[in-house]
Amino acid sequence: MGMFAFYLFRSSIGSMNILTYFSFDTEGKPYFMVVEDGEIVRRELVFGENLTLEFDVTKRFCTGWHDIETKENFVCPENAEVEKKYEQCKKCMDRTGFNPAFYHAGEVSAQQESYNAQAHGLYLAYFSDKYVKVGISRASRTRQRLLEQGARAALVLEEFKSANVARQYEAKVADVEGVLENLQVAKKIELLEEAFDFEKAKEKLLADKMRIEDSVGVKFASDEVLSLDEFYGEAGNLRGLVDMGELGVISGNVVACVGSVLIVKNGDDLLGLAVKKFLGYEVKIGTEVRDLELPAQQVSLF
């Protein structure tokens, strides 16, 4: 199979609802987008309201394409079904023209070049004392990017004139012992059971900043540590959180959303689901709370 052999065939999604996007807006409020009857519908995620999401993972469909300049999202014109390891078909990837790992690519699109020419921030994202991640993001949406990742606190080390410059520093920081470049969602869900203390996180991030500066020989401009928990709802006590990712369904009263991990209260149980894992899948959406069978091996994730 060639690199883009995941484009399978034209398939009409008809009246199915397909989850295509999950993020936080500029005010820090979580929302998701669904293709309903061929149109993109934006749905707000409201803390305190009842919500049921049930996914059919038998087929995955293209999530469509995004205009980097106008920030608009569009339905896949081909209504393409894709292999389960991809979110987009080849045509929509080309229409979007964005590669988050552009620094490994032999060439980049005109859209990517324009995007990379914009100011980018270099940040440290705190998930726990043992898990601090470095990353870069377009400066105008750094906070949104941190919220999407579910960071509990963060330190934006500096802003640079382009993604290419920011990436050079990101690579150097990633080589420093104890700093991660990637963190799996499953680990993020585990860490949600740990108590979060902002002052402790702040102390850790500032100490890491000093250690990184000594290692790479650069003094970064900012010492301001951001607290992000205020945007996540009631994320302070998530002991006993049950990961529903194996079943692809969640139902209850929405209490929190940390990154893409939706957290609800169902009876005496706290249930969590990493919603972004289900982009491209058919979803049934309701407001009636259902009794759910929990995963067979229900144990504490911590």
Image (cartoon, rainbow, N blue to C red):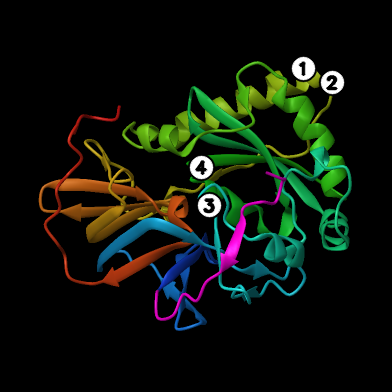
Q: Which residue is mark 4?
A: 151
- The magenta stretch spans which residues? 1-16
- Do we see residue 69 in this rendering? yes
Q: CA distance from mark 4 to mark 1?
A: 24 Å
Q: What secondary structure do most residues of the magenta stretch adopt? A: loop
Indicate the quadrant containing the N terminus: top left, top right, bottom left or bottom right. top right
Indicate the quadrant containing the C terminus: top left, top right, bottom left or bottom right. top left
At label 1, the amino acid type is Asp
In the rendering, at what x and y percent does residue 70 appear?
Answer: 73, 75
Q: Nearer the viewer, mark 4 or mark 1?
A: 4
Q: Which residue is mark 2?
A: 217
- The residue lying at 28 percent from left, 55 percent from top is 249
- Is 11 a magenta residue? yes
Q: Mark 3–mark 1 contact, CB under 8 Å? A: no
At label 2, the amino acid type is Gly
- Left or right, residue 134 beside residue 192: right
Q: Which residue is mark 1?
A: 214
Q: Which residue is mark 3?
A: 148
Dot 1 falls on a residue whose secondary structure is: helix
**Disc nearer the start of the sequence (4/2):** 4
